[in-house]
Amino acid sequence: MSLKTWFKIIALFLLALVFFLRLTSRPAPVYPYYSSDMKYPLVIAHQGGDGLWPGDTLFAYQNAVKLGVDVLEMDIHITKDGVLVLMHDETVDRTTDGTGDIESMTLAELKQLDAGYGWTSDEGKTFPFRGQGITITTLEEMYQTFPDKHMTIEIKMSNAAMIKPFCELIRQYNMQDKILVASFFDDKMKDFRAECPEVATSSAKNETTIFVLASKVFLAGFYSPKFIALQVPEESGGITVMTEAFVKTSHARNLTVEVWTINDTETMQKLIDWGVGGIITDRPDLMMDLLGR
């Protein structure tokens, strides 16, 4: 068989493979999280608005709700005694008047800390929320306080298992349709989807990377996402993620694009003009004003 014939066979095989992959690819699954009564683009208060108040605290979320934001974004860890609490870091050192890993402390010990202690808006000149009675918040307190509010909940790094208790708490408070789960860790996201398949998720780190790279070479149409949202930065690792074409490509796969963490109105307006589904921001007040809400 001649070399030319071999090339034709290989070309036909690759063409058939491409056709098969395109034929079998599926858009993102449908979940009720993005309900028809939500206003778009979504104003997503990052940690409740960490540029305005001590983030990941009930105090911040109460004020964010007063502003009228659409989604409350938060991070979860698990305590020594198995309680899910809100905190961005793995330790309490940066934000409170205590020290230590969250996983090495009980809820009672954490509740003794001042969760407003480390917040400052002027590079440490003043600390306006110290001594105001702001405490570390549990996830259960969030469900009890805001049973009708949409939430994005990020699973953070942990040594102790928290996927099962997290899923059980969602079901206990019937929050399945109100929650979008996020994580940078693909293994944790895989475990969560297996444990709680009825709850919507965004893309984990490797999933995001694959989709972004595929979109750059016009192959995103072959990708079958297991998630309904892409929560992405404007750029990562020297690669520009956010473009108008990326938003359109994502929409073609039934994916909502939510960009983090945007704190200036000029960038917000650009992303809104591109048709993003939501903006994750430390300054939800600025976005609410921009949208005239």
Image (cartoon, rainbow, N blue to C red):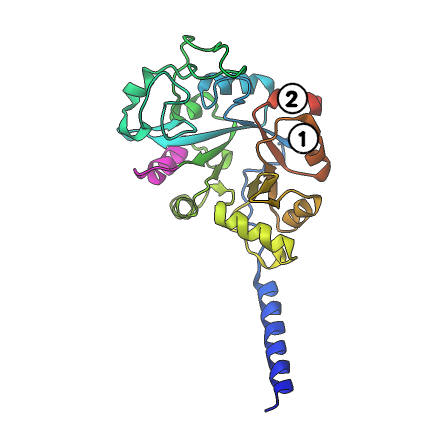
The dot on residue 204 is: none
Up-down relation of residue 166 to residue 65 (above or below) = below
The reply to whether residue 262 is in sight is yes
- What amino acid type is highlighted by mark number 1? Met
The residue wearing badge 2 is: 286
Farthest residue in the bottom direction? 1
Q: Secondary structure at mark 1?
A: helix
User: Which stretch appears magenta?
Assistant: 157-173
214 falls in the magenta region: no
Seen at 60% across and 84% down, the residue is 6
Q: Are marks 2 and 1 in contact (CB under 8 Å)?
A: yes
The reply to whether residue 27 is in sight is no
- What amino acid type is highlighted by mark number 2? Leu
Q: Is residue 270 left or right of residue 94?
A: right
Tell me if mark 1 has few (under 14), some (14-19) or many (20+) residues whose alpha carbon lies within 10 angstroms of its own: many
Up-down relation of residue 210 to residue 280 (above or below) = below
The residue wearing badge 1 is: 268
280 or 197: nearer the eye? 280
